[in-house]
Amino acid sequence: SNLWPPSTLDDVEKLLNDLPKACVWDAKDICQWEGFWFPPAFVKSTITLRSRFQARDDDVFLASTMKTGTTWLKALSLCIMQNKSHQNSNEHDDVLTSGNPHFLVPIIETTIYYSKAPPVDIYDASAPRLLHTHLPYSMLPNSIKNSACKIVYITRNPKDNLISMWHFFNSLYRPNQDPYPIEKAFDCFCSGVHPFGPFFEHVVEYWQESQKRPQKILFVKYEELKSDPKGQVSKIAEFLGRPFADEKEVDEVLWRCSWGRLKNLEVNKSGNFLKDVPNKSLFRKGEIGDWKNYLTPEMKEQINQICCIKLEPFGLFL
Ligand code: A3P
């Protein structure tokens, strides 16, 4: 629109007013911007981010929609970047005991440029910076796309993603109430009306870019991390220029980041990683195929059809 890029706060408000709106789980307002759905505060902070953020060549970005294994990837990447698994390692060396992975790897568009707070100064953060974004590839600041920084994208099977999101929003927006009707959640997911949706378009953007520029973007599937953790984590470490010295190091990192261990760390058992989001809600079940306990055969078929139309023509099978 002719308001882009907005130059004043009034322009931002006008832009926000004009965007299509929806309500997720009858609880949370979201708006559609450049083809994707975001919480309104996200739009504001992303506008600031896109006008100010300068990526560095040695930055590492993790990217994802929501509920795709981001917490795990953050933990793994922290360990890889710190490469602290020296012989006499003990709990005190372990950064994961000092904070929740989402606190340790901040989301650039919200944590750093959230509209109500002054931007967190990450310019002094010691290099290399490890950061996260929920933005689709097309909406990333140009300096992220054009500098030599690396991006690791994680995604998972859409049916499991939907179920993970359903549980997460139920605990967030409907504590001590009946769950939101699964049929409605299913419709929202299939039509892409949920934060950072549509899932399929988000995934395809990063997938295609990772095919074009494999040095720039590594595309990781949650299911592959589960079935071949050593192979996948070694691949991530090599991609980030920090290959493991031996198998013991790989085992150590996998153990540190294992679901059972993270879930039971004191920092994750208590506290909130966002205002209303308890850390413990990030570690629900950590399994593949939980959708089978919730989706009907018709629902399964419908999501498979969407994959067939939107992902498989690009050689992407989830
Ligand atoms: P479930 O809801 O299926 O259990 P995100 O981190 O992007 O929010 O994704 C959340 C999903 O990742 C949840 O899936 C959660 O259980 C799973 N998860 C979190 N930490 C994990 C870990 N260390 N290993 C495996 N899965 C993990």
Image: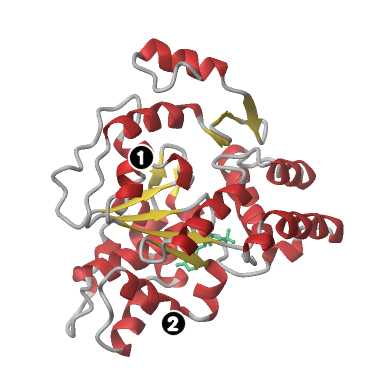
Residue farthest toward the top in the current orientation of the protein: 10
Location of residue 264 in the rendering, given as x and y in whole percent from the top left corner: 41, 66
Pointers 1 and 2 in contact (C-beta within 8 Å): no
| Mark found first going from the N terminus, 1 or 2 | 1
Give the residue type at disc 1. Answer: Pro
Q: Residue 120's spot in the image, x, y percent?
A: 23, 36
Which is closer to the viewer, label 1 or label 2? 1
Residue closest to the eye, 88 or 308:
308
Number of marks present in the image shown: 2
- Residues under labels 1 and 2: Cα distance? 31 Å
- Foreground of the two, 246 or 238: 238
Pointer 2 residue: 231
Colouring chosen for the image of the structure = secondary structure
Tell whether 190 sits left or right of 138. Answer: right
Residue carrying label 1: 141
**Type of the residue with mark 2:** Gly
Residue in view at x 48 percent, y 53 percent: 64
- How crowded is the residue under tag 2: few (<14 C-alpha within 10 Å), some, or many (20+)? few
**Residue 45 occupies which quadrant of the picture?**
top left
Count residues near mark 1 (Cα–Cα under 10 Å), then give few for <14, some for 14-19, many for 20+.
some
